[in-house]
Image: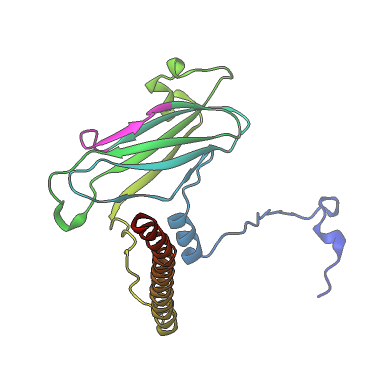
Amino acid sequence: MHLGFLQFTEKSDNKVDNVTLQVVCVFPTSIHRSLDLKTTTGKLIEVKPTKIRFPFELKKQIPCSIFISNKTDDHIALKLTSTNWVDYRIRPSMAILLPRSTREVIVLMEDQRKAPRNMRCDFSLTVNAVVTFAGATVKDVAHNMFFRESGNTVDKVELKAIYVSPPKLPSPVPERCDKRSLYWASATATLQKFYNGLARRRMWKSCTKINFDSNLIREPLLVSSSNQTGG
C-alpha cells in the first residue's frame, strides 16, 4: 500500500498523532566515574591540590597550603569546615574571593605525640562557597548563607588529607659516584700535594741560598776589622 504525505496531515480528516523525542549525549558509566574521582572543581570555585598531604613527623607542626580560585565574575564568600578542630588549624577559615582571583589557605597540623594507627589521617576539609554582593567583607559572612534552603547558589568541595613520608635530606656524600670522577678527583689531589711540596722545597732552597750568601758577605768584613785592630 502506498502512503502519501497528505495522509499524515490534519487536513486529510485522518486521526493523526505526533510524538516528540529529545536526544541527549551522555558519558559511558566508567568514564563518568573516573572524571568524578579526579575533579575538585565546583560550579563556583576550584581547589588545588586534590588532596592535602602532610609529611608526618612527630613533635613538629606541619603546614600545608591549598589554593582556592574563583571561577566566576561575582564575589564569592568562603567558609572552611573540618572534621577535627583540635589537631588542625585553618587560616583563614572565612574569606571573600574577588572575581577571577585565587586565595591561599594554610592548614596547620599541630605537633603529634605519637603516630596514628596504620598512619591514617582522620582529617578532611570542606570548602563552602556562596555568591555574595560586591564590596562584602568577612563581617558580612553569615553561617546561614551556606544552606541551600536559603535560596543562594551554594558550592561545596571536599578534600581528604593523607600522611606522606617526610622528604629526605641530601646526603653529604653521593651514594653513587662515577669511577672516572673518582680517578680525576684522586689525581687532582695528588698533583696538588706534589705542587705544594715542590713549592716548599723551592722556598727552602731559596732561603738557604740567601743565608749562605749573607754569610759570605759578612766574612770579609770580619777579617778586615780584625786586621785593623791588630795593626
Question: Which scheme is used to colour this image of the protein?
Answer: rainbow
The quadrant in which the C terminus is found is bottom left
Residue 44 in view: no
> Residue at (53%, 40%) from the top-left corner?
43
Q: Is residue 203 visible?
A: yes
Splitting the image into 4 quarters, where does residue 158 fall?
top left
Q: Is residue 226 magenta?
A: no
Depth check: give the residue in front, 67 or 25: 67
Given residues 175 and 29, the one toward you in this image is 175
Name the foreground residue: 205 vs 164.
Answer: 205
In the picture, measured across the screen, residue 8 lies left or right of residue 183, that is right
- Pick whichever, 214 or 111, lies toward us: 214
User: Residue 201's spot in the image, x, y percent?
Assistant: 39, 73
What span is in magenta? 83-94
Extreme-front residue of the structure: 231
> What residue is rendered at 46% in x and 55% in y?
36
Residue 77 image position (x, y, % from top left): 48, 26
Q: Is residue 59 left or right of residue 13?
A: left
What is the quadrant of the N terminus in the image? Answer: bottom right
Residue 185, given in percent of the width and then of the height, sits at: 41, 76
All told, the count of numbered labels is 0
Residue at (16, 51) in percent of width and height: 116
Query: Residue 63 location, x and y as percent?
Result: 33, 41
Relative to 146, residue 114 above or below:
below
Q: Quadrant of residue 8?
A: bottom right
Q: What residue is rendered at 65% in x and 57% in y?
A: 23
